[in-house]
Image (cartoon, helix red, strand yellow):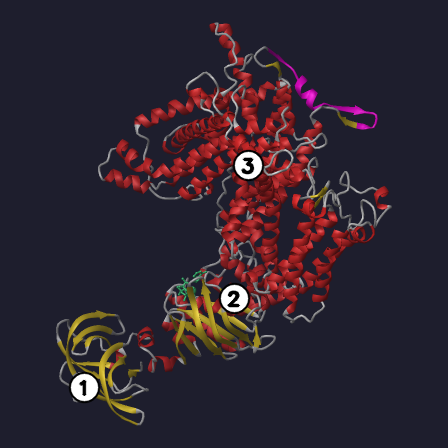
Amino acid sequence: MSKNGPASVEFRSVAKRYGTVTAVDNVTFTIEPGKLVTLLGPSGCGKTTTLRLIAGLEMASEGQILIGGRDVTRLSAADRDVSMVFQSYALFPHMTVLENAAYGPTVSGVPKAKANEMAVEKLGLVGLKGYEKRLPSELSGGQQQRVAVARALVLEPQVLLFDEPLSNLDAKLRRRVREDIRELQLKLNLTVAYVTHDQQEALAVSDRIIVMSNAAIAQEGAPRDLYEEPASLFVADFIGDANLVDGELSEIQGDRARVRLADVELQLRHRGARPGPIKVAIRPESLVLAAQRPAQQAVSGRIAKAAYLGTHMEYTVASPLGELFIVDRQVTQPYAPQSAVWISLADHGVTVVPA
Amino acid sequence: MKRTAALWLGLGWVGFAVLPWYLVEGGSLSLDLLSGWPRGAAGGGLFLGLLEGRWWLLPLALPLLAALIGLRLPTDDRRISDILVWAGIAGLAWFVFQGFAIGLRGWGGNWLVALFGAPGPKQEGMGYGAFLTALSFLMLLTHGLAARGFCRGDAFTVSSIGLIIALITAFVFFPIWEILVSAFKDNDGRFALNEFAAKFFDNSIWGLDCTYSSLRCGVAWNTLFLAILVGVGTTALGLAFALIATRTAFRFKGLLRILTVLPIITPPFVIGLAVILLFGRSGAVSAILYEWFDIPRSRWIYGLPGIFLAQMLAFTPIAFLVMIGVVQGISPSLEEASQTLRAKSWTTFSTISLPLMRPGIANGFLLGFIESMADFGNPLVLGGNFDVLSTKIFFAVVGASHDQGRAAVLAIILLAFTLGAFYAQHRWLGNRSYTTVTGKGDSGLPLPLPRRVAILCYGTAIPWAVLTIVIYVTILIGGFVKTMGRDYTPTLQHYLTGFAIERASWGIHFSGSAWNSFFTTIQISAIAAPLTAIIGLLTAYLLARQRFAGQRAFEFGTMLSFAIPGTVVGVSYILAYNVPPIEITGTGLILIICFVFRNMPVGVRSGIATMSQIDKSLDEASLTLGARTFTTVWRVILPLLRPAIVAALVYSFVRAMTAVSAIIFLVSAEYNMATAYIVGRVEAGEFGLAIAYSSVLIAVMLVAILMIQISVGERRLGRRSTSDVALQGAG
Ligand SMILES: Nc1ncnc2c1ncn2[C@@H]1O[C@H](COP(=O)(O)OP(=O)(O)OP(=O)(O)O)[C@@H](O)[C@H]1O
Ligand SMILES: [Mg+2]
């Protein structure tokens, strides 16, 4: 739908320094046209900076940035065909909803009537017909957010950027708006870069996720890849709360190897790890609790803490593998604290973490 | 970028070839002058260079040609930016060099005389053409820098920075530099350290005779002593007023509010004038004392007591403004915490509240100190034999001795004092004196004043408030009676002398003697105010919203003029602009420039304060929507900046109308300002006219403030409320 069609975004060894602080360090990635890519990571890891580099609000200290194959490294924000939805929405408080939405075309010289027409169309798209005359201060948080989206869409940019667009919304609204954004992106075939620090949100909406840590990319891939095959301890822990357990790797055969975890022996993909001590990531839902010793291999443990969360139970269990965090779907007859349990491993959600 | 650069280059050629290069006498063109064009007095630089032997102008053509070639290169050629940068630098460098090297009477430096022999070529002050050419070089330079990626490649930002740096250099640093240089020179323009030392350590400046004999002390000690007294006094009174306003159930708080507006609209020396009318030899109070108690009339008011009294009256309201912010800034919850720990109210006040106010009190003191140092009007009308630096400087320039070198030395001492105080304030307290005064909605009840503190506050503040009211009543009625203190017959004579309007055969004739200066004042102030606002807010934008190398130095440069006392500014402007290359003394322009750069810091401060309340992502949103920086500033920031615009406009207008110290050096017969005229009347003993004129000024300023407030209007923000920007001034 964009007048030039969605464009790719490419970073080639981009770095951004503020004095001695390195906010983004030697980052290389590509966002394919028409895809929604999430930048995910803990606070201060450089997500916003990366987004602002795409927008042209910051200038790269090093490296090259390409949008749609064109080198835009030195172009200012106004010269790039990129729009951004800000965390604070950044609606102009002295302009009405319509004036806000029509701002882009107006300042680029489109006649007023045409600009308003474009704005009204996009406001309709986000479901805000009839609100044109209001001031931003007269809208709810969710409505303001949608005005911000409409305003960014009006120019039909090659790339659309979102910086934590949902962080000012309550939990319920968050889920709905993120679905709306995803739907809009698919329908209009937009290239979107989306910043969040909420891993659930990232898993739910993205085609691909770029996990950042300490100004660099920790891992990049489809949501499922990241969850199931984390490339590092950081990623394993950051996405979906993995238990990181010490193990011993031996007897590599093909792409699999034998892994010993305390008393338990498993065949796992070695993912390039060398024989010797290694770390294994185990998802909380891949640890199966039982009161009696099960048929398959298991270790014994003792429930340290138990919490009831409606749909599931969360346990902290002391075991020879260390403290384990376990999610159990079975809520009708929970294990009491201090009771002895057996812990076995499911056949998924257990991975060797390379490096 | 390339298009605007080309536009500037075109303007540069116009300036160089078409417009009159030199200043045309009288400032405007007559047909007579134009007939000789392109030669003659109104000739363009290019032709003067080619045809009239002003060969030193010709090198300026080279950078203009280079830029012309550079801009014809294909758009993505990287050499364009280099060419623009170097053309700009080379053009500016030669421009400045020839401007200073060749003066009105030949070579402008002794080394040039030594090299080429006297007298050398001559030239007059620069005119429109020269100005436009220089501006063009500057813009070529900034556009080149922007193309190289300065300030995220934003030409508007780089150009604004360049322009403001150039202006500050020309109109703040250059005059100060001139004053420094002339202090070290003898009257023939030679470097003379001995003479400087002799002037600097003169007994009339640093002498301590008054401590052990009946002789007078040096003027530096006088000034310092007075400033400390006034600093302490105004702070104490200001604090008393502030405590009454915030911590008591005083019934006339509305009156206190008025107190905060008074200093803004009262020309500083008017207080001195009223003090004379009350306490002078023939003053109203003196007359009463003589008739009722047989206390002989005397001249005791002339000297330290009078100046002290006048400055206290003039600056206490400012101290009140600062102190009220300080007192309100103390979170009541701290005091409540103390009380819940069983502290009595006096204990809480002395152990919690007062220590918390200490930085604010120090700040108030420094402000009063600086105000007193910089004040010129009150010492002038009330000084008698008590000299202070600011008046001494004035008399060194206009007096019989006419010793500019001595004026420069005195100015440097005064500047050192005020800069020292500002430095202390900055280092020690940060920029608190400019913080906005807003009633913070911190819940909890502030501690009521302990009894003894309350008594002390009322005891000092109420008599003082009464005195202030008496002073203003004096100002008000002084213009309507024959002679204050002698003859209270009501009369309109003073107003008629000043503001008579007659119907003449050719229409209305403004025959009053004050009209001339009155119209000039209104005109100059009305031109200066928007310029001040524009430059101040632009600077504020650059400081608050952009990041660039050397920003701290830039900020210092823009705030510096705040710390320079008016008399120093006046002397330095005379020294700097009496001769080419910038020869503007005696014009209205020099008054405007003086006002703009003296009052700009307030625009900067109020702009920064308001801008920091505006979320930065608004600008960024605008940028990502394809708006250029200029459009963003125009459509997004400016509309949200209305309170700051009002503050800057009001302040600069009012300051321009009330200023005395700097402009008394700069006025001319043609461009006389109201304040200078009034001071002249006071010196001639025509108090009635002076006080009548002052009342008119006060009324005009009130009207102006209201009009600006109405015409700029409120920000349109829907439910969101706006917070006021406090007005406040110094120096
Ligand atoms: N203007 C600046 N000057 C100096 N350092 C900065 C600047 N902007 C960002 N940084 C630093 O760069 C790093 C990355 O900042 P960034 O805003 O990109 O983090 P983020 O990943 O978006 O974090 P969050 O999730 O908290 O928003 C931080 O350490 C931050 O302190
Ligand atoms: Mg961020």
Query: Residue B193: which numbered mark, if any?
Result: 3
A274 w.r.t. B378: above or below = below
Which residue matches tag 2?
Answer: A59
Q: Is residue B313 magenta?
A: no
**Residue B272 sits in quarter:** top right
| Side (left or right) of A47 relative to B21 | left
Percent of width and height locating residue A91 = 52, 59
Q: Amino acid at mark 1?
A: Val
Query: Residue A112: which numbered mark, if any?
Result: none
Q: Which residues are magenta?
A: B487-507
Which residue matches tag 1?
Answer: A264
Which residue: 60% across, 28% down? Answer: B396
Q: Are marks 3 and 1 on the same chain?
A: no
Asked whether the viewer can see residue B248, the reply is yes
Which residue: 21% across, 81% down? Answer: A288
* Label 2 CA crowd tier, 10 Å (few <14, some 14–19, many 20+): many
Q: Disc 3 and disc 2: Cα gap in Å?
A: 51 Å
